[in-house]
Image: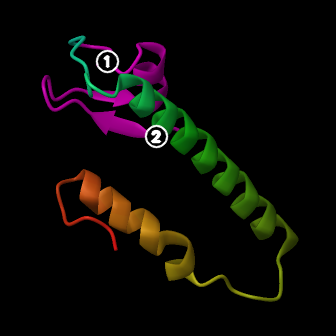
Amino acid sequence: MKIKGTCQFCTREFFVEQAIERGGHCPWCGRSFQKDYAAVLVDALRTAEAAGQTLENALEKLVEVHPWFELDRDSVAMKIEEYLAALEGGARPR
């Protein structure tokens, strides 16, 4: 999974991996995405990217083995959707 974002300064898209490599700065305009907590931001981005890849790999394996059950979509995606909405300026997740 390759997570993408959009810089609020230059409005260009970037991959999280690029922001990690640049210490929490936009790979295009160089502005800091979080000047006061850059180390925390980079760590959280790294964790999100790894967790996303882990989840993607696990779901791929489940699809391959064709289990005799269905996963509840909301139980997998609901909190993720809430946090993404919060990052887009919505309400904080419960």
Which labelled disc corresponds to residue 25? 1
Locate residue 47: give its quadrant: top right
Which labelled disc corresponds to residue 3? 2
Q: Name the outermost residue toward the bottom.
A: 69
For the residue pair 33 and 13, the one nearer the viewer reads as 33
- Where residue 41 sits: x, y (%)? 40, 32
**Crowd rating for badge 2 (residues with CA inside 10 Å; few <14, some 14–19, many 20+):** some
The numbered mark, 1 or 2, whose residue comes first in the sequence reads: 2
Under mark 1, the amino acid is His
Residue 25 seen in render: yes
Q: Name the outermost residue toward the left.
A: 9
Q: Which residue is rendered at x = 55% and y = 79% of the image? A: 75
User: Does residue 88 show up magenta in the picture?
Assistant: no
**Crowd rating for badge 1 (residues with CA inside 10 Å; few <14, some 14–19, many 20+):** many
Locate residue 16: give its quadrant: top left
Q: Which residue is rendered at x = 78% and y = 68% of the image? A: 62
Please, what secondary structure does the residue beneath circle 1 have?
loop
Q: Which residue is rendered at x = 66% and y = 82% of the image? A: 71
Figure quadrant of the N terminus: top right
